[in-house]
Image (cartoon, rainbow, N blue to C red):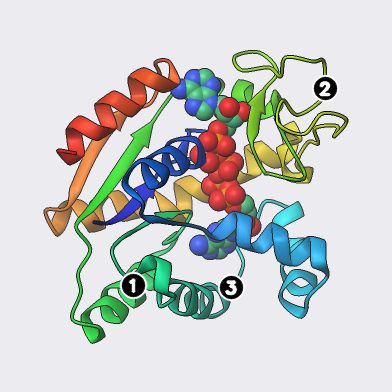
Amino acid sequence: MRLVLLGPPGVGKGTQGRRLAAQHSWALISTGEILRDAVARQTPLGLEARKRMDNGLLVPDDVMIGLVRDRSAEEDAADGFVLDGFPRTVPQANALDSMLQSRGQRLDAAVGLDAPQEELVRRLSARRECPVCKRAYNMITAPPKNDQECDDHPGTVLTQREDDKEATVRRRLEVYENQTAPLLDYYRGQGRLRMVPATGAVDDVYHSLSQALGC
Ligand code: AP5
């Protein structure tokens, strides 16, 4: 299955995408993670993207389209993938359609996850991640067993994303409303959109998501 996860920052795209991809052996293509990795390694892409990311702004479309074109052509994505964080603009969605069409493929579904804004801000302020395995924690709803350390990597202290500070989170939410939310209508118009409420516990959201996809 080729699937797009849509929704505002903090709604759970990464959490649900990781689980779906692992359960069905689909590739998980998270553009945020690819960019954060490039920032950490100080590659030319990372150096270009960092300032925009730290300010809650989008990285230019042509950069993102090239990145997804290459990643989605890798072998592990041949039988299906979950896109987390792409597309984020109408030009990116158009490029994805053309890219798949040129390969004789198509997108099977776009899932829109939704939750109230104050819940998103609460989730992101409490989010921490393991710098080694990228496992996401939430200091309120899903804390690590041992204070600030990753359960799977004892001794590794969890970190907070630079763009999870409250002012930047609010900017990201605005950018989502202005530039990404229009994609809900884009995919509704194609008959591919399935909306899933993302307010319950992680397991309940996963159950609704799987039902919406019929898998
Ligand atoms: P990206 O990393 O994609 O950030 P985002 O879309 O803002 O999404 P998040 O990762 O913040 O949230 P999420 O929905 O994945 O939630 P999560 O599962 O982690 O992008 C970062 C930046 O990169 C962008 O701002 C932009 O600059 C750039 N970028 C990336 N892609 C781009 C593109 N295509 N074009 C241009 N620029 C691009 O969950 C959040 C927290 O909530 C966690 O702590 C989790 O444990 C918790 N949680 C999850 N589900 C639940 C639940 N059901 N109940 C309680 N807590 C929950």
State which tag comes first along the sequence, 2 or 1.
1
- Taking 107 as reference, is 83 left or right? right
Is the CB of mark 3 within 8 Å of ligand 1?
Answer: yes
Rounded to the nearest whole Å, what is the CA distance between mark 3 and mark 1? 15 Å
Q: Identify the residue under disc 1.
A: 96
- Taking 184 as reference, is 215 left or right? left
Residue 194: horizontal and vertical position, in percent? 20, 41
Q: Residues within 10 Å of mark 3 (few under 14, many from 20)?
A: few
- Taking 58 as reference, is 74 left or right? left
Q: Secondary structure at mark 3?
A: loop
Is the CB of mark 2 within 8 Å of ligand 1?
Answer: no
Which residue is at the front of the view, 114 or 13?
13
Amino acid type of the residue that numbered disc 2 sits on in the rendered structure: Gln
Which residue is at the front of the view, 14 or 152?
152
For the point 30% across and 61% down, which residue is it? 80
Say which of marks 3 and 1 sits in front.
1
For the point 48% across and 73% down, which residue is it? 71
Q: Residue 144's quadrant in the figure? A: top right
Which residue is at the front of the view, 55 or 75?
75
Asked if one can make out residue 174 in the rendered structure from this viewpoint, the answer is no
Q: Identify the residue under disc 2.
A: 148
Q: Do the numbered discs 3 and 2 sit on residues whose CB atoms are within 8 Å?
A: no
Residue occupying the far bottom of the picture: 102
Rounded to the nearest whole Å, what is the CA distance between mark 2 and mark 1? 39 Å
Say which of marks 3 and 2 sits in front.
2
Q: Does residue 22 lie above or below 58 as drawn?
A: above
Q: Secondary structure at mark 1?
A: helix
Asked if one can make out residue 138 in the rendered structure from this viewpoint, the answer is yes
Q: Identify the residue under disc 3.
A: 60
